[in-house]
Image (cartoon, helix red, strand yellow):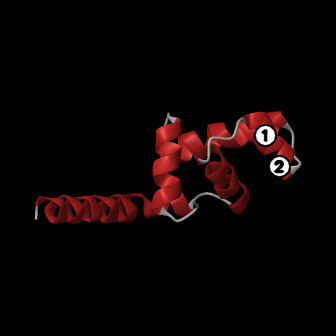
Amino acid sequence: MKHIQNKAERLLAENKFFKENLGKFLSLGNRAKEVLRLVALGKSSGEIAHELNISTDTVNTHRKNIKKKLGISSTYEFTEYAHAYDLI
């Protein structure tokens, strides 16, 4: 039964994160959301640039702006947002 309690707590925490951060997430444009998704998948700026047919500098600008808008600093946090909003 302990696993059920743990799962319930995890679902409540995920729901709380979703609600608390929805406004910030919605402030991102479509391209920024795509970059967010690819970063969360572990892609490098060069790989993202190649996949999206944009320059590495543009990818890095998107990454910087995403970090600022979402108030994040790590790849883990990119992944947390991507999971919460079903990007991956």
Give the answer, above or below, for where 85 lies relative to 51: below
Q: Position of residue 26 (x, y in %)?
A: 55, 63
The residue shown at (50%, 34%) is 74
The amino acid type, in three-letter code, at marker 2 is Glu
Residue 8 falls left or right of residue 43: left
> Disc 1 designates what residue?
47
The amino acid type, in three-letter code, at marker 1 is Glu
Disc number placed over residue 83 in the picture, else none: none
Give the answer, above or below, for where 12 lies relative to 45: below
Which sits in the foreground, 47 or 77? 47
- The answer to whether residue 71 of the structure is visible from this angle is no
The residue shown at (39%, 63%) is 18
How many numbered circles does the render carry? 2
Category of crowding for the residue at label 2, using alpha-carbon neighbours closer than 10 angstroms: few (below 14), some (14–19), many (at least 20): few
Work out which quarter of the rendered image holds the N terminus and state it: bottom left
Work out which quarter of the rendered image holds the C terminus and state it: bottom right
Residue 24 falls left or right of residue 19: right
Which sits in the foreground, 66 or 39? 39
Category of crowding for the residue at label 1, using alpha-carbon neighbours closer than 10 angstroms: few (below 14), some (14–19), many (at least 20): some
Residue 34 falls left or right of residue 84: right
Q: Do labels 2 and 1 touch, CB within 8 Å?
A: yes
Residue 49 falls left or right of residue 74: right
Residue 13 lies in what quarter of the image?
A: bottom left
Mark 2 element type? helix
> Disc 2 designates what residue?
51
Residue 42 lies in what quarter of the image?
A: top right
- The answer to whether residue 11 of the structure is visible from this angle is yes
Q: Position of residue 30 (x, y in %)?
A: 70, 62
Mark 1 element type? helix
